[in-house]
Image: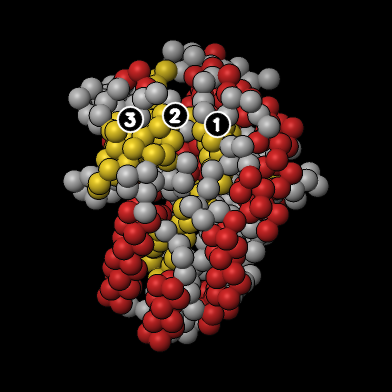
Amino acid sequence: MIDTSILQGKKAAYFTLGCKLNFAETSSIGEALSRQGVLAVSDGEVADICVVNTCSVTGVADQKCRQAIRRMVKAHPGAFVAVTGCYAQLRPDEVLAIDGVSLVVGTEQKGDIVDLIAEKMSERDALGTKLTVATKDIRSFVPSCSRGNRTRYFLKVQDGCNYYCTYCTIPYARGRSRNGSIASLVEQARDVAQRGGKEIVITGVNIGDFGRSTGESFLDLVKALDEVEGIHRYRISSIEPNLLTDDIIRYVSVSRAFMPHFHIPLQSGSDEVLRLMHRKYDTAFFRSKIERVKELIPDAFIGVDVMVGCRGETEAFFEDAYRFLEQVDVTHLHVFSYSERPGTKALEIPHVVSPEHKNERSQRLMALSEQKTHAFYSRYINKVKPVLLEHAQDGRPMHGFTDNYVKVEVENHPLLDNEIVDVRLLGFSADGTSLKGEIVYG
């Protein structure tokens, strides 16, 4: 039994890079430290403990992680600095070499990070400590259900990935697919309801692959969560097209609480590039999946991940991808550029896309995304939709989202924070990123 009394009264600072899953996990680490008497540092204070949760999805992400760690060390001189996350798992020696880093915690040990911080703070090893295991030995599932900076909660249901896409390092950073049990996840959702939470975002690395550890299925999980009283909204953060089954789509179409909102990774609208990526579908399959969603849930917001500039993406292949995305009925494109990752199969693919062409392609797709989102939002002007409002500073407009994820701006009504209200949607806001609305009473 590790003595954690050394943590009592200490102050901690946190920094997170990367995905929603990382933010949820950092929040859970913060809650665990809080239970040991650790306070969150206030602005201008120097922390005793710093926790940095890293990302490694691109080379730029690695660089940002190193910069963030150095900033934390500089801002909090003498603090015990613990670094975890994907970059820490993949490049622990690089992290440990950064001046001021006290502890590097890999994926398998992340659930024990509070005890490890207490143990190593007691020892105060000036050389720092690295605690990681090989990817093949990552087995544990660390639960996480935490509130973000806004209204919604994030429930981690799954971790790891068995898909070895040629461009991706995530399976090496997070290990094989594994998950919590439906019973344990339902219990966490009930706890959110007791705390007054109304919306939960279901997160994970490859959530459609849920059930590898427990012999259950993602559809079983969706049905069980839908029965939790007090939770009014669920959103599925991201689900692979080949795992978004017709049964799941049908269930969401009649669900009590699962919102008409999907995020479905595509990565490329070129069949040749999808083959080079080792994705598990082609564009015809993806199109059929989108058409099925729209057939059963016409108002569904559909976000799509798209990568540009990966190895092998010739000009002709990109034009194929652009034309496909023009035609398919999706709402928003999350566009990002390919980044070379050491150890990935993509490095064996000929034809390297220049940074200039990557940028040009990104700009074209982001412009297309704006057109699609604007057209989708325009369909709801003058309609009344339920909006979950989020806290705003005094004098600032409140924002929130409709059931189908249209961002809405209304006048500030502090008593309506975390309340679902009917709002009549008017024209676009000044910056064009949301619709203005007026609350409908009675």
Question: What label does residue 320 carry, if any?
Answer: none
Q: Earlier in the sequence, mark 3 or mark 2?
A: 2
Residue at 61%, 37% in the rendered image:
256
Most foreground residue, 221 or 11 = 221
Question: What label does residue 232 carry, if any?
Answer: 1
Residue type, numbered disc 3: Ile
Q: Earlier in the sequence, mark 1 or mark 3?
A: 1
Most foreground residue, 351 or 77 = 351
Residue 123 is at least partly visible in this image: no
Most foreground residue, 315 or 84 = 315
Query: How dense is the environment of label 2, judged by Cα within 10 Å: few (below 14), some, or many (20 and up)?
Result: some
Would you say the residues marked 1 and 3 are in contact, meaning their CB atoms lie under 8 Å apart?
Answer: no
SS of the residue under disc 1: loop
- Report x, y in % for residue 261: 51, 49
Whole-angstrom CA distance, mark 3 to mark 2, is: 10 Å
Query: How dense is the environment of label 3, judged by Cα within 10 Å: few (below 14), some, or many (20 and up)?
Result: some
Most foreground residue, 331 or 149 = 331
Residue type, numbered disc 2: Ile
Is 323 on the left-hand or right-hand side of 411? right
SS of the residue under disc 2: strand
- Report x, y in % for residue 18: 43, 48
Would you say the residues marked 2 and 1 are in contact, meaning their CB atoms lie under 8 Å apart?
Answer: yes
| Residue at the spot of label 3 | 439
Note whether 439 is above or below 365 in the view shown: above
Query: How dense is the environment of label 1, judged by Cα within 10 Å: few (below 14), some, or many (20 and up)?
Result: some
Residue 137 is at least partly visible in this image: yes
- Report x, y in % for residue 281: 62, 72
| Residue at the spot of label 2 | 420
